[in-house]
Image (tube, grey):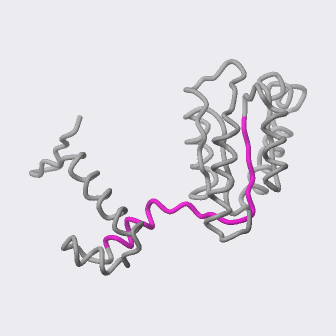
Amino acid sequence: MDLIRIGDKLISRSKMQRAIDQILELRVQGLSQQEAANRLGIDRSFISRLEGLGEVRRGSRIAVVGFPVANKEEVLQVLEEEGVEYSLILTDAERWQFAQGKSGQQLVNELMEIIASLRTFDAVIMIGSNYRIQLSNALLGREVIGMEIGTSPITEDKVVDVAELRTLVRSIKREKGEQL
């Protein structure tokens, strides 16, 4: 629904989205936060906070985690070509094998080690269901960039659009000013 009531106020989501789009368009055009604020009649600090809310920490150290992936070898090839430092790409069968044969303590310890390792990267691309992306974001914070391949629960391998993945990795690198 477009309209939301908050106390005595009636808020329009579409009006808010149009305002955000205007702010971002002015910033993309090269206007400073102050120039955009002056043009739109808002406080510069609002633009700063808005950008902070949407900011994805990006950098050259990229990790990619994805499952269940049907075209695993093709995904790994792209990640290698693009210089991604860490990848954990699993098929549906492999993700179940990962958990089998381990005690609860062993499984939790391994997952905690993976999470701790991922937190050292500037950007983490999570390829998976909407729920897994949301969960990863809660565990890792702002550095997670989701690439949704289905709605949870995903019960079979899904094909990852490798051209989209390559574009995403390159855009993260470009933000850091790296040579491609």
What is the x, y in percent for residue 117?
79, 56
- The x, y position of residue 132, in whole percent, is 61, 37
Identify the residue shown where x is 39% and y is 69%.
29
Q: Quadrant of residue 19?
A: bottom left
The N terminus: image quadrant: top left
**Residue lying furthest left:** 8
Q: Is residue 92 above or below residue 141?
A: above
Left or right for 165, reference 113: left
Q: Would residue 135 be found to the left or right of residue 40 on screen?
A: right
Left or right, 39 with reference to 125: left
How many numbered markers are drawn?
A: 0
User: Outermost residue, right direction?
Assistant: 101
Residue 13: x, y in percent? 24, 46
Point out the image quarter for the C terminus: bottom right
- Residue 127 position within the rendered picture, expressed as x and y whole percent measured from the top left: 66, 39
Among the 4 quarters of the image, the one containing residue 101: top right
Q: Is residue 125 above or below residue 179?
A: above
Residue in front for this viewpoint, 44 or 23 = 23
Q: Residue at x 78, y 53 (%)?
A: 82
Q: Is residue 19 magenta?
A: no
> What residue is at 69 percent from the left and 63 percent from the top?
122
Residue placed furthest toward the top: 155
Foreground pick, 9 / 110: 9
Q: Which residues are magenta?
A: 46-66
Q: Nearer the viewer, residue 162 or 52?
A: 162
The residue drawn where x is 19% and y is 47% is: 12
Q: Is residue 133 above or below residue 17?
A: above
Q: Is residue 13 above or below residue 116?
A: above
